[in-house]
Amino acid sequence: AQTHNILILPGDGIGPEVMTEAIKVLKAFESPQHTFQLRQELIGGCSIDATGKSVTEEVKQAALDSDAVLFAAVGGPKWDNARRGLDGPEGGLLQLRKAMDIYANLRPCSADSPSSSIAKEFSPFRHEVIEGVDFVVVRENCGGAYFGKKIEDETYAMDEWGYSEAEIQRVTRLSAEIAQRHNPPWPVISLDKANVLASSRLWRRVVEKTMTTEYPDVKIVHQLADSASLIMATNPRSLNGVILADNTFGDMLSDQAGSIVGTLGVLPSASLNGLPGDKTLETRPYGLYEPTHGSAPTIAGQNIANPVAMILCVALMFRYSLNMEDQARRLEDAVRKVLDSGLRTPDLGGKAGTKEVGDAIVAAL
Ligand code: NAD
Ligand code: IPM
Ligand code: MN
């Protein structure tokens, strides 16, 4: 029997509501072979209120000691003006990403994913536009404009947007590994603004060199990031593959992917420092699983938030951190079944509550 130590970080806004459903689902997978030891801690605004810090050293250490972290969402109007940068609620998440060195954030979006059934009728796009869409955004998660030097005065502000060769290399390698393992083989589509930004010119050079020397069999395409946004809205299928992007471009494009399925409420993500069985893994594997959406303060506390993104994070955790691929698929099938049945929260045009959807997914397992 295996005991998996999971750190639970519900955070703010709808975070605790969607996390409750994810835990419900996780517990349904307890068996003589697999048990889950859960430790719950504060992060974000609630942590600021309780400890004065958006994340404490103790919680960071707990993340490093765990087998995987489930994170829901942080932030809200209450803290918007009080704190800045790494001290604000969002900074708690950023500090954790840095402490765990989880440099690759995988954000899958697929018309064959558990959200496909809803995408067809609920997407604002026509069928023929989104049919067969299947990509994963691999967002660089520990560098770029998010973590550079900052100046924040009354009349001038600056975010240093820098990348080193090594930072670009490692996220390129991980992207290439995903592309190579995919069946059929995927291209890597790398986004940048090499026509304008110096950091993008290094990005393009290092991606190109890493791909051609280490992964000559994987197709590499360089795409300007602004036109990638247009393509995602006009011909998203042509982006099928691994979309490799720096921290900022990846953040923006992965939210835009929500428009394909019609809501952010169904898109999970995995932040990793390597893939299972990855030859590029330098330390022990770390994984933090977080929905692409935020704390959605305007719908918090009403039992109407969609728990599917958070629940699908459990499936990604099974897949990437716990070596439980069968369970990951079973969970994704159950989600698909429930969405197909029409039981959906209001962001998908339904009338179901957060808890009802969680219960239905457990029942469908
Ligand atoms: P958001 O993702 O919270 O919300 C965007 C839109 O999607 C809103 O209309 C919201 O109601 C809807 N939405 C999001 N998740 C949903 C769900 N599970 N079910 C149904 N509808 C859902 O982004 P925002 O409004 O720009 O930001 C709100 C707060 O969240 C801010 O403080 C922001 O900093 C924070 N944020 C946190 C994270 C995170 O913790 N990872 C991510 C993004 C934003
Ligand atoms: C996300 C969020 C975060 C980010 C914020 C909350 C720090 O928008 O996970 O996409 O910008 O990375
Ligand atoms: Mn974001």
Image (spheres, grey):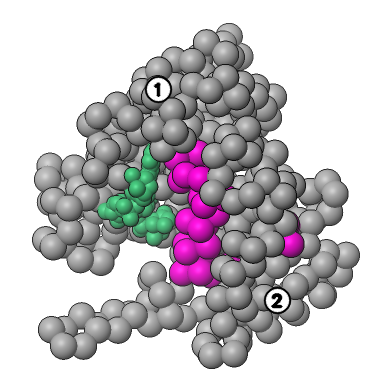
Q: Which residue is mark 1?
A: 352
**Is 322 above or below relative to 176?**
above
Report the residue at 79% width, 56% height from top. 186
Question: Distance between the Cα atoms at labels 2 and 1?
Answer: 42 Å
Q: Quick one: 328 or 137, which is closer to the camera?
A: 137
Q: Secondary structure at mark 1?
A: loop
State the extent of the magenta-drawn residues as a range: 238-267
Residue 147 position, x and y percent, is 38, 71
Which label belongs to residue 282? Answer: none
Left or right of residue 342, residue 42 in this image: left
Q: Secondary structure at mark 2?
A: strand
Question: Which of the two discs, 2 and 1, sits closer to the camera?
Answer: 1
Farthest-out residue, front: 126
**Is 174 above or below relative to 271?**
below
Amino acid identity at mark 1: Ala
Dot 2 or dot 1: first in sequence order is 2
Q: Is residue 263 magenta?
A: yes
Q: Quick one: 136 or 216, which is closer to the camera?
A: 136
The image quarter in which residue 280 lies: bottom right
Most common secondary structure along the magenta stretch: helix
Farthest-out residue, right: 217
Q: Quick one: 279 or 334, which is closer to the camera?
A: 334
Q: Which residue is mark 2?
A: 222
Mark 1, residues whose alpha carbon is within 10 Å: few (<14), some, or many (≥20)? some
Residue 102 position, x and y percent, is 50, 55
Report the residue at 57% width, 13% height from top. 364
Q: Quick one: 229 or 210, which is closer to the camera?
A: 229
